[in-house]
Image (cartoon, coloured by chain):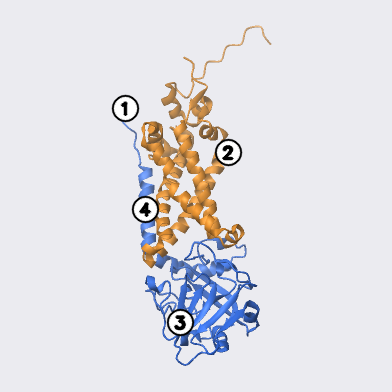
Chain colours: A blue, B orange
Amino acid sequence: MEPEARQTAIGRRVFLGMAAFAATGVVFGTQIQGWLERNVGPVLARDPTGLLALLPIGRFRIYTVTSDLPSRSRAEYRLHVRGLVERETVLTFDELTALPRTRLRRDFQCVTGWRVPDVEWAGVRLSEVLDRAGVKPEAGAVRFVSFDGAYSESLTLAQARRHDVLVAYELQGSPLSSEHGGPARLYVAPMYGYKSCKWLDTIELTAQVEPGYWEHRGYDVDGWVGHSNHRSDDTTS
Amino acid sequence: MTPPAELERFDRVERLAHWTTAVLFGVLLLTGAALYAGPVSTLVGQRELVRMLHVSAGVALPVPLLVGLAGRWGRRLRRDLRELGRLDDDDRRWLRRSTRAGARLAKFNPGQKLNAAFLGSAMVVMLGTGIVLKWFSLFSLDTRTGATFVHDWVALGIWIAVAGHIALALRDSEALRGMRRGFVSARWARTMRPRWYEAETGEPAERLRAPEPAAPAGSS
């Protein structure tokens, strides 16, 4: 048998290279994605063709904790306010949008790393909704529950009264779609996305903060962007 | 002995493994795009169905290849995979533009070898990171962020590799026929894959040019 020609194990090399990339990516993905979102995201947002926007930088990801996207029409929609309030209140979608309207333009930061620059929201300040129901003096916190009851979140009353906390019903100038939490959701501008409860069904005034869905799974209750969850993102509000 | 007009390039097991894997890749690329790209996912609706399809196809992805490799029926597949995994001197000659014309390729060209190595490795990486994304509650936040990052960028690489693979296959109908029907013409094998032709037939690929017959006298 003639001697084998000089051979390179290309298959093994490519596999080891990919494995090294994947391992590095899994371990340092938080830092790399953060760097990309800060430095490349704003550039991609200005690309006139919109093609670069397909890259995995500066994009919303859709997460749900249930297997289905909850869907409810605007006509069916009701926002319940109850708990430690003077008047239990139920708002229809039209009643909600009749309240004073507020716009906010902020970056949206997820605790899993992605960040969408310059997102425009429109809605009603949560404090307006709270004032309509009248908050009892013994209330110290606000709890939010999604349509199906599967997801919940909480804020202290002081956090809930901030001017950059909305019940939002428009995103980027359009009605809030179901996948983004429509017809209406909470939007807590200075905190990570998991605080902004989608498909908002019930606002309940409570004495103390009750940890929500993710907080039972290890996330910080005070989810300030850049100052919680061991992350160091730029603040959003 | 007359050389055969056609050579068997891929046997039934190899073709079955290739095409079922190809269908699964197609399902994964399309459902993945639907889950990832906002407008597409609104259009498709039925997010849960799409997600279920994506996860099922992902779990099934390595199965055809593993089954094809497992038994006695996988001898040719195993042999071809071994060959796909190695670059020889002719491959290196082919990769350099200046020496490409002199390269005498065996069964696969280096592009096919790189494509196979990349897609095979990508399957493992996507399966691993996909498990993190699907069963997220078992993993730390940083691991999930990292797995998302890797899954996204490798997916982009797979899109490019698969698009290139299909485009090149469509440009060479004889090579495509080899994967569709299993056979290629001896002529194709002789010119495109001379060393493979020789190994299969025992004949030299480059025929010695027969001397021109002398023109008969008196003709005009």
Which residue is tagged 4? A19
Q: Residue type at mark 4: give it.
A: Ala
User: In the image, which is nearer the foreground, mark 3 or mark 4?
Assistant: 3
User: In the image, which is nearer the foreground, mark 4 or mark 2?
Assistant: 4
First in sequence, mark 1 or 4: give its number.
1
- Between the C-alphas of marks 1 and 2, the distance is 36 Å
Chain for mark 4? A
Q: Secondary structure at mark 1?
A: loop
Residue B171 numbered tag: 2
Q: Residue type at mark 3: give it.
A: Leu
From the viewer's side, name the closer residue of A129 and A115.
Answer: A129
Q: Position of residue A50 (x, y in %)?
A: 60, 63
Task: State yes or no: discs 1 and 4 in contact (Cβ < 8 Å).
Answer: no
User: In the image, which is nearer the foreground, mark 1 or mark 2?
Assistant: 2
Residue A2 numbered tag: 1
Which residue is tagged 3? A155
